């Protein structure tokens, strides 16, 4: 199947499953423990019903928004995902350029396989860098300095990884980072020769954002070696003082990613955050917590417009984005959908994932009778105000 033949994100997901070696597909797809939160993130949207209003002029839908100091053509940030070159050798660069073409924002991960400087050079792209706080303050400060020097527009600090989530799919599959040929993987890779050729033609596998940019942070090994390498480097006692220190140094748009409670969201605003990213890490950290969409109304109430809100997790349709905005989000964030596209078709697949979500989003806006994001936020699109079925 070609990318243009994929009608929805589910089609891209099936293509990614067919093209990636199974351990890599499982790494994208998986969540922690019983994957209950992972599933709830997607199904959670079905509990909210849209309420269309008709006989309004919706010939020209304008879905642009201002968020984190940037203007987006439509309200989406691509989520930070680590080690993206494992899925396709064009990795983060292909994703960032596709985001620029579509007019949405891109978030580079601390665990990315492309440097802050290389992403910084992509023109016409709203850029955010996602920080995992390291236990060496000089390294944290160096990351912030590099982002400023590379003209990043915003920073986000992920706070939900105090310890690694229990991802049993990765332990079972014996996933190694970077992927390596051994007895267990031989059969899996042999069934995916296209991926193997593509991967082998890629450059050296590095994590160039951890540390000072001198190429530290290779951290290779099996998934548990990587987890312990990561655990050694991470700040295990991340506090609001850390957030305040980064806010003081950065002096620009700052988001906190991974908050789930109204209390923490309020504290984030007090600590200097311009945006709160409501997220459970795509169900990859704490299993048993709520679907992201269910957390949104209470957080929107608590923040009361004092900060922007980005809803992350489970978005597979443009209508999901419409529901998130109608419930108080300023914009949305998505991870797996673009990774499916990248893994299956490279840059063309990322383009396709964005084209699908964008057209679904704008079609749904028109069908509910909203011409702008401001119309949506006025609450006209949801059943019974709060929106619960
Ligand atoms: C992630 N996520 C993530 N988050 C983060 O803050 N830093 C990171 O390095 C990563 N890495 C990562 C790798 C992979 C393969 C996935 C699937 C996810 C979480 C990501 O930013 C986002 O929160 C979720 O992907 C959102 O859920 P959906 O959109 O995938 O349902």
Image (tube, rainbow, N blue to C red):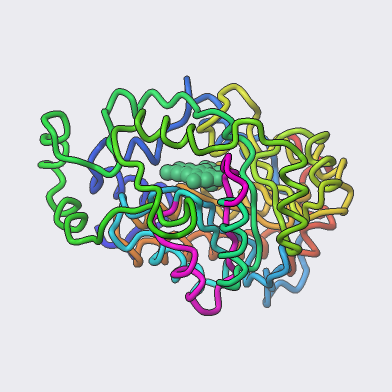
> Which one is in front, 33 or 325?
33
Q: Which percent across, then down, holds residue 277?
A: 68, 47
Q: Residue drawn at (35%, 27%), measured in percent from left and top?
A: 169
Q: Is residue 130 magenta?
A: yes
Does 352 appear above or below 314? below
Q: Which residues are magenta?
A: 112-138
Query: How many numbered circles are shown?
Result: 0
Q: Residue drawn at (69%, 51%), measured in percent from left and top?
A: 310
Image quadrant holding the N terminus, namely bottom left
User: Which quarter of the figure has residue 374?
Assistant: bottom right
Does 377 appear above or below 65? above
User: Which quarter of the figure has residue 373?
Assistant: bottom right
Task: Say if residue 363 shows up in the picture.
Answer: no
Does 188 appear above or below 137? above
Q: Is residue 238 magenta?
A: no
Q: Which percent across, then down, holds residue 58?
A: 71, 72
**Direction from residue 208 to residue 130 in the image, left or right:** right
**Direction from residue 274 to residue 102 in the image, left or right:** left
Q: Which percent across, then down, holds residue 250?
A: 71, 61
């Amino acid at each position: 199947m070609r990318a243009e033949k994929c009608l929805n994100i589910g089609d891209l997901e099936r293509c990614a499953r067919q093209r990636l070696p199974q351990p890599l597909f499982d790494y994208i797809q998986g969540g922690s423990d019983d994957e209950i939160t992972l599933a709830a993130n997607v199904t959670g949207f079905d509990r909210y019903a849209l309420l269309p209003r008709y006989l309004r002029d919706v010939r020209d839908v304008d879905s642009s928004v201002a968020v984190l100091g940037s203007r987006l053509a439509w309200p989406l940030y691509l989520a930070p995902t680590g080690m993206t070159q494992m899925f396709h050798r064009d990795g983060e660069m292909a994703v960032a350029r596709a985001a620029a073409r579509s007019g949405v924002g891109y978030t580079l991960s601390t665990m990315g396989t492309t440097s802050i400087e290389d992403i910084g050079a992509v023109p016409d792209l709203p850029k955010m860098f996602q920080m995992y706080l390291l236990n060496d303050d000089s390294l944290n400060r160096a990351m912030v300095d590099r982002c400023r020097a590379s003209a990043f527009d915003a920073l986000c600090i992920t706070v939900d990884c105090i310890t690694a989530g229990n991802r049993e799919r990765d332990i079972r599959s014996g996933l190694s980072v970077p992927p390596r040929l051994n007895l267990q993987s031989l059969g899996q890779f042999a069934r995916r020769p296209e991926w193997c050729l593509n991967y082998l033609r890629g450059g050296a596998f590095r994590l160039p954002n951890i540390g000072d940019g001198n190429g530290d942070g290779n951290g290779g090994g099996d998934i548990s070696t990587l987890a312990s390498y990561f655990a050694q480097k991470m700040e295990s006692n991340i506090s609001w003082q850390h957030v305040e220190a980064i806010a003081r140094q950065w002096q620009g748009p700052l988001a906190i990613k991974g908050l789930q409670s109204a209390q923490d969201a309020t504290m984030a605003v007090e600590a200097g955050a311009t945006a709160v990213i409501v997220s459970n890490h795509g169900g990859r950290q704490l299993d048993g917590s709520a679907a992201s969409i269910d957390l949104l109304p209470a957080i929107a109430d608590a923040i009361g417009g004092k900060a922007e809100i980005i809803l992350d997790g489970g978005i597979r349709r443009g209508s999901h984005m419409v529901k998130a905005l109608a419930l108080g989000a300023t914009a949305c964030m998505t991870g797996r959908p673009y990774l499916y596209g990248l893994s299956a078709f490279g840059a063309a697949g990322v383009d396709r994932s964005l084209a699908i979500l964008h057209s679904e989003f704008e079609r749904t806006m028109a069908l509910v009778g909203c011409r702008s994001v401001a119309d949506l936020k006025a609450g006209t699109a949801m059943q019974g105000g709060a929106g619960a079925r």
